[in-house]
C-alpha cells in the first residue's frame, strides 16, 4: 500500500509540474457494501483530487475554468440545471464551460475530452449513460481533475470524487406512498388496476426511483389489492429509453388497446418522472374513455404542472434544482480551495469501484393543493408560466 501511495504521489507531482502554466441515500434498493479494496480505491481518488486542488489553492479563483456536462436540452429540467449551475458558478468567480450533448453518448465523451484539453480544473457531469465515460474520466484522473457526478451516478469509474443528487430512493418512496394513501390500499376494498412506467435503464437513478416505489407497492401487487392488467411489472418491462415521452405514449397506447378499451377502469399509473407521465397522459387523452387514473410524476415540469392544475396529473415530486446547484457550487468551491466537500451519505451509492461520497438533497411532494406555495411563491416559476 505504501508503494501504491508513493506512486500516486509521484504521479501527482509530475502532473503538477506539467500543468503549472495552465489555467484552467437514505436507503437504496439491493445495495451491497463494497469490498475493502474498492472503498480504499475510492478514498484514494478523493484524496488525490483534493491534493491537486490544494496545489491550485494559491491561484486566483477568478478565471478558473469549470466544465459542466449536461445530457440534453430536450427535457426542461436539464436546461434549468445547466443554467442554474452556470449562473451560480460564475457568481462564485469561476468561468464555466457548459455543454449539452443531445442525449448522444459519443457527443458527451467528446465534450468532456475538450473540457479537459481546454484546461478545466474540475468537471461536473450529468451523464447520459453512466457506464460509458471511462476514457475521458481516465484522462481526468491522470491529470488530477476532480469529478462530481451530478444527479446521475457515473458507474465503473474510480475517477469520481463526489456525487450530488436528490434522495432518489425517497423520490420513488414518496410516489408509492402517495398512491398507497390515495387508493386506500391499506384498507379493505375492491382491487385497483395500475400500470408502471419508469425511465431509461442506462440511468442508475431509475433503479432507485422504481425500487423506492415498489418497496411500498409490491406487497399490494402480491396480495391482489393492486392488479397490473398488462402483466408488466419487471423493471426491464416498464423502462422507457431516454425517458422519452413519445415512447411512453406508444407503450401506453398499446396497454390501453389490449387491456382497457372494453371499459375496464385504470385506477392509477406510477410514472417515475414527468416526461413519462406526459406520454401516458397524451395516450389517455387519445384513446381512454374510462374514469381518469391517479398519475404520479417527478420534476414539476411546466406542462405537467399545467396538467396537474387541470386534474390530469395528481402529483409530482419536486426537486428544486436551485438547491442542488447551490450545493454543488459549494462542493466545487470547497475542493478548489483545497478542502473537502460537504457530504451526508457514505453508504448508499456504490458505482462498482467503491462507495462514492454523496450529498443528498430532499425531494418534496407537490399537488394542486400546494403548487402555488412550492413553485410560485418560492420563485421557481411565475404565475404566467403556468397559465
Image: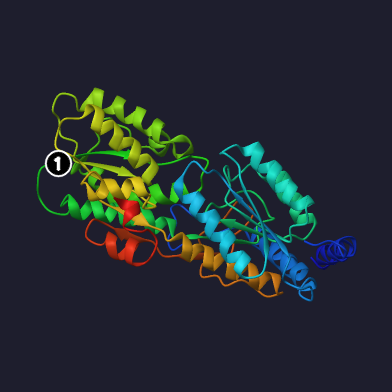
Taking the spot 51% from the left edge, 47% from the top edge, the residue there is 204
Q: In this view, does 243 lie to the left or right of 135?
A: left
The front one of 102 and 216 is 102
Quadrant housing residue 110: top right
Instruction: Determine the residue located farthest toward the left in the rendered image.
Output: 189
Q: Is residue 1 left or right of residue 267?
A: right
Q: Is residue 164 above or below residue 219?
A: below
Picture coordinates of residue 10 (x, y %)?
88, 64
Instruction: Determine the residue located farthest toward the front in the rendered image.
Output: 384
Quadrant housing residue 341: bottom right
Please, what secondary structure does the residue beneath circle 1 have?
loop
Q: Is residue 229 visible?
A: no
Picture coordinates of residue 141 (x, y %)?
75, 56
Looking at the rendered structure, the number of numbered marks drawn on it comes to 1
Quarter of the picture containing the N terminus is bottom right
The front one of 173 and 252 is 252
Taking the spot 42% from the left edge, 37% from the top edge, the residue there is 239
Taking the spot 25% from the left edge, 28% from the top edge, the residue there is 286
Q: In this view, does 349 lie above or below 342?
A: above
Q: Can residue 103 be seen in this view?
A: yes
Question: What residue would you read off at disc 1?
Answer: 191
Q: In this view, does 55 lie above or below 381?
A: below
Amino acid at each position: 500500500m505504501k508503494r501504491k501511495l508513493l506512486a500516486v504521489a509521484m504521479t501527482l507531482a509530475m502532473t503538477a509540474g506539467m500543468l503549472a502554466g495552465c489555467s484552467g441515500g437514505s436507503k437504496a434498493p439491493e445495495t451491497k457494501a463494497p469490498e475493502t479494496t474498492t472503498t480504499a480505491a475510492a478514498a484514494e481518488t478523493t484524496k488525490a483530487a483534493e491534493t491537486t486542488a490544494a496545489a491550485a489553492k494559491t491561484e486566483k479563483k477568478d478565471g478558473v475554468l469549470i466544465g459542466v456536462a449536461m445530457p440534453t436540452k430536450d427535457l426542461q429540467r436539464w436546461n434549468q440545471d445547466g443554467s442554474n449551475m452556470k449562473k451560480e458558478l460564475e457568481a462564485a468567480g469561476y468561468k464555466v464551460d457548459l455543454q449539452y450533448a443531445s442525449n448522444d453518448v459519443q457527443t458527451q465523451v467528446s465534450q468532456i475530452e475538450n473540457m479537459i484539453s481546454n484546461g478545466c480544473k474540475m468537471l461536473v457531469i450529468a451523464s447520459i449513460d453512466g457506464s460509458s465515460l471511462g476514457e475521458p474520466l481516465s484522462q481526468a484522473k491522470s491529470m488530477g481533475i476532480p469529478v462530481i457526478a451530478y444527479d446521475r451516478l457515473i458507474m465503473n469509474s474510480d475517477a469520481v470524487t463526489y456525487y450530488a443528487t436528490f434522495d432518489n430512493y425517497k423520490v420513488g418512496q414518496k410516489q408509492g406512498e402517495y398512491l398507497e394513501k390515495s387508493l386506500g390500499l391499506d384498507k379493505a376494498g375492491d382491487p385497483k388496476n395500475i400500470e408502471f412506467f419508469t425511465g431509461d435503464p442506462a440511468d442508475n437513478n431509475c433503479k432507485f426511483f422504481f425500487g423506492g416505489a415498489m418497496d411500498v407497492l409490491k406487497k399490494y401487487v402480491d396480495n391482489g389489492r393492486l392488479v397490473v392488467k398488462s402483466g408488466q411489472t419487471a423493471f426491464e418491462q416498464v423502462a422507457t429509453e431516454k425517458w422519452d415521452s413519445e415512447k411512453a405514449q406508444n407503450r401506453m397506447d398499446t396497454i390501453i388497446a389490449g387491456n382497457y378499451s372494453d371499459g375496464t377502469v385504470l385506477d392509477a399509473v406510477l410514472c417515475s418522472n414527468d416526461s413519462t407521465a406526459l406520454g401516458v397522459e397524451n395516450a389517455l387523452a387519445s384513446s381512454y374513455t374510462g374514469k381518469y387514473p391517479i398519475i404520479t410524476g417527478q420534476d414539476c415540469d411546466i406542462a405537467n404542472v399545467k396538467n396537474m392544475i387541470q386534474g390530469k396529473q395528481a402529483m409530482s415530486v419536486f426537486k428544486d434544482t436551485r438547491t442542488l446547484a447551490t450545493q454543488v457550487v459549494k462542493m466545487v468551491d470547497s475542493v478548489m480551495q483545497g478542502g473537502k466537500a460537504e457530504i451526508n451519505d457514505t453508504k448508499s451509492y456504490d458505482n462498482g469501484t467503491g462507495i462514492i461520497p454523496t450529498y443528498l438533497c430532499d425531494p418534496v411532494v407537490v399537488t394542486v393543493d400546494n403548487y402555488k406555495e412550492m413553485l410560485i411563491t418560492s420563485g421557481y416559476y411565475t404565475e404566467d408560466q403556468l397559465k
